[in-house]
Image (tube, rainbow, N blue to C red):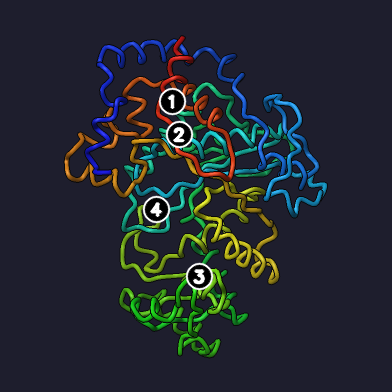
Amino acid sequence: MSLLKMQRHPFFSYTSTLSIAITLASVALFGQHTLVEGLAYAPNFITKIISSSTGREPVGLLDVGNTDTPTESDDETLITGSTGPITTRFPPEPNGYLHLGHAKAVSFNFAVARMFAPDGRCHMRLDDTNPSKEGQEYVDSILEDVRWIQSGCSPFPDNLDGDDSPKKSTLADIGPWFGPVRTTSECFDFIYDCAVSLIKSGDAYMESLTAEEMREYRGTLTEPGKESPYRNRSVEENLEMFEKMRAGEYKEGEHILRAKIDMSSPNINMRDPALYRIKHESHQNTGDKWCIYPMYDFSHPISDALEGITHSLCTLEFEDHRPLYDWTIEKLSDVGLIKSRPRQIEFSRLNLKYTVLSKRKLIQLVENNHVTGWDDPRMPTLSGMRRRGVPPAALRLFCERVGISKADSNIDFGVLEECVREVMD
């Protein structure tokens, strides 16, 4: 579908009169906490996994009768008797505005934490590991959108008895999430130490192949990869090169740090994936302190573990990345660098018929001036929805009606429109 076809979707043909009416009614709606707090998800495989693995029962789910139908995700749900708080997180990359697809992730992560009261919690984290595509504008818009879509819901308290977690300390930290706004960049020193540890244990090495050569060595879905000629460098050489890499002595693309796992693995993500790359760019948080940055797949599980995340809820495109997530946790746990062992669980992403939900394509609309900005009312972004006057409760109701499963689906846009009408009425 071309980028401009979305502008001809019926959603973009609403009259300005309707937008004004929705805006006025949404202002009145914000005070109706009983309606907002009354919304609920149906039981799903994720709540069942959490309940089975911790021995804790969720509260506030819809009563839909017996839901004991086995699913493919019900394995390995051995009860551990965990008594710690169920902790989730919403970790977007600040490289664009949030869109309707993110509404499902925001709503469900916050909802799961509230289901496991009284100490359930949801963190707000910005996975800011790629300075070339990130910026403060995106950071500010993400935080504002999360505050908006969760408006009317009870925030997580910061003053739980005996809790020594970080507290909100700045205006930017104020929001419905638990504690302050967290960033991956705050953990860069520790993530670097983790990389050094993997080198010392022989689980990581410095790669000098070009990007094109690495693609050739990686293999295909049907053919195994080949080991790099630099794979068996000594620990001492790898450490020396990694220190020079951090000191800025190499050009971008000249070397990277790779995990040493299995080049014949049927999962391409486990064929010695990259852990660190060189980027001679300033970071919005750390400035020029770093010229090397961790890959998302490496920093993600470390950040989860450091924050005490118990359940890392991701969309299905990360399912093939889960073995690398678990490998990272296991290797760093074995040497005592991390104590927590978060569990990654995947669910299907939100797809809407006739609607572009790709940041890569949406940014083209903005940069090519087809729209007035990310918050243009014609855009399927949360800020665009807000300008149209769509109540946040309607988006949460929509996410709850769509539900949580592992089956991909393409939802009709009329379902969202019906939720808007229902909340407005």
Q: Which mark's residue is nearer the viewer, 4 or 2?
A: 2
- State if disc 1 and disc 2 touch (CB < 8 Å): yes
Residue kind at label 1, given as amino acid type: Leu
Q: Residue at label 2?
A: 411
Q: Residue at label 4?
A: 285
Which comes sooner in the sequence, label 4 or label 1? 4
Which comes sooner in the sequence, label 4 or label 2? 4
The structure residue drawn at horizontal position 37% and vertical position 71%, both measured from the top left corner, is 278
The structure residue drawn at horizontal position 31% and vertical position 49%, both measured from the top left corner, is 360
Q: Secondary structure at mark 1?
A: helix
Which comes sooner in the sequence, label 2 or label 1? 2
Quadrant containing the N terminus in the rendered view: top left
Q: Residue at label 3?
A: 268
Using residue 329 as the reference point, say whether residue 272 is left or right of it: left
Q: Residue at label 1?
A: 416
Residue kind at label 4, given as amino acid type: Asn
Q: Which mark's residue is nearer the viewer, 3 or 2?
A: 2
Q: Which mark's residue is nearer the viewer, 4 or 1?
A: 1
**Quarter holding residue 339:** bottom right
Residue kind at label 2, given as amino acid type: Ile
The span from disc 4 to disc 2 (Cα, nearest Å) is 38 Å
**Quarter holding residue 24:** top left
Q: Residues within 10 Å of mark 4 (few under 14, many from 20)?
A: some
The structure residue drawn at horizontal position 38% and vertical position 43%, both measured from the top left corner, is 139
Residue kind at label 3, given as amino acid type: Ile
**Quarter holding residue 22:** top left
- State if disc 2 and disc 4 touch (CB < 8 Å): no
The span from disc 2 to disc 1 (Cα, nearest Å) is 9 Å
Which comes sooner in the sequence, label 3 or label 2? 3
